[in-house]
Image (cartoon, rainbow, N blue to C red):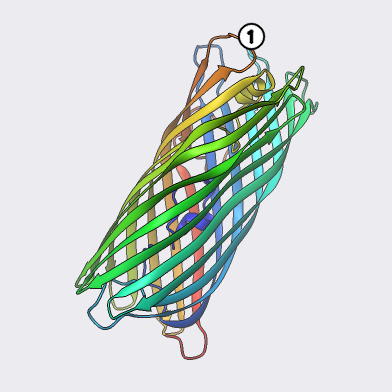
Amino acid sequence: MGIDLVSACIFCAPYLLGAELPPRNGLGTEIGFSYATLDRLLPPANSGESADISEVTPKFLLVGVGEARPPPVGLGAGTPAFEWRVRVALAPSHDNQIRTATSTQEPIETDGTGRYENFALLGRFPIGGQGSLEAVLDRRTEKATDLLNIGGQEHQISEQRNLTAERADGALGWRQRWKDLEVAARVQYAKVTGYNATAGAYMNSSGGIFGGGLEGRYRTGGWTTTLDFQWLTGSIDVLEESFPAFQARKSSQNATLQALRFGLGYSWPRTDLFLTATFDRQRLPFVSLAVLGVETVAFDGGYHPDSNNREFYGDLTVRYTFTPSIRARIGMRMATGHEKVTLTDALGDRPPITLDVDRRGRFGGGFSENLGFPEFTLYVGADFAIGGGH
């Protein structure tokens, strides 16, 4: 399991049954803290317009407990033969969106608070001398309440918005080990939910999609390499209503989640280092995280969204052993990408609207259309042996 449980993203690929660094043998516990940010930016289409920028920023506390036992010496590439683990990550979050007024645009501002409630449950059970049966449950969710000011004076409130973004995964797999090598395959299910409700629109999308994943892991000397691929697709139920009639519009829309991850690590006597690079694609029939001002107006006006997000992110993890019972860990994620949001008129024959949204991050300072910093996650933590763990 990796840094995904304390990242601001909800729909990006979780680590699930894979791992960057081998966990502690024996019984142990962990604690960690994280700062994360995710921004969506719509640059101005013409001179005289202003950028539309929206962000969500959680600050996590993570606690976990688990137990692991290694496979026979020489088998596999670092994944335990037996393992159980429980991890919970909770965070207050802050939503913020702004589009300043120009001669052609009305101002739109949003400010809100929410909470992340993430958890992961993992079980790995040896069968025979070289294989393990694996199972995992993983959920990431954010629920937020925003106050919106659309076209009004400063501190004026136009409406309130309730948001929910959630991805819950379950997977069952098999891992086979040989000398310094292991290969795993899994079947996977994910329930994705996007909820967005204002005075002018009600949008609720939820459903399960199916797929699977493959993972390979190889170790030689101090080096470890990993490769993981996952693909889930299916249809989810969409219910939408909007001003003025609020007539229910029900449909079944396609959703796809894909990811390809490559990892490379090296271990010294006291220090472990692991770096992963991931290409992630999310195709979803809703927008419910860091919603832009122009999207809010479009949803209230009866438009339906289709989001196609392609993103690259890299994770760097460093772990240092102070004593056999205490290890410290620092993790960092950088991500950047591009999201195409297509808005189609569900009430009439108005032409579709295409939004080319940048996925970036913000680190200090105020909002600016010149944002260049990637989406950012910083994690600091430690794990401790319990009893005879080492």
Mark 1: which amino acid?
Ser
On the image, the x and y values in percent for residue 229 come to: 33, 50
Q: Residue at x 67, y 15 (%)?
A: 106
Q: Secondary structure at mark 1?
A: loop
Q: How many residues crowd around disc 1 within 10 Å: few (fewer than 14), some, or many (20 or more)?
A: few
Return the residue nearer the eye: 293 or 362: 293
On the image, the x and y values in percent for residue 287 come to: 57, 33
Return the residue nearer the eye: 66 or 213: 213
Please determine whether, in this image, residue 278 is positioned above or below residue 309: below
Quadrant of the rendering where the N terminus is positioned: bottom left
Please determine whether, in this image, residue 96 is positioned above or below residue 250: below
Name the residue that disc number 1 marks.
Answer: 103
On the image, the x and y values in percent for residue 85 come to: 50, 72
Please determine whether, in this image, residue 230 is positioned above or below residue 112: below
Task: Specify whether residue 47 is in view.
Answer: yes
Task: Specify whether residue 17 is in view.
Answer: no
On the image, the x and y values in percent for residue 227 come to: 28, 55
Residue farthest toward the bottom in the current orientation of the protein:
388
Q: Residue at x 55, y 71 (%)?
A: 64
Quadrant of the rendering where the C terminus is positioned: bottom left
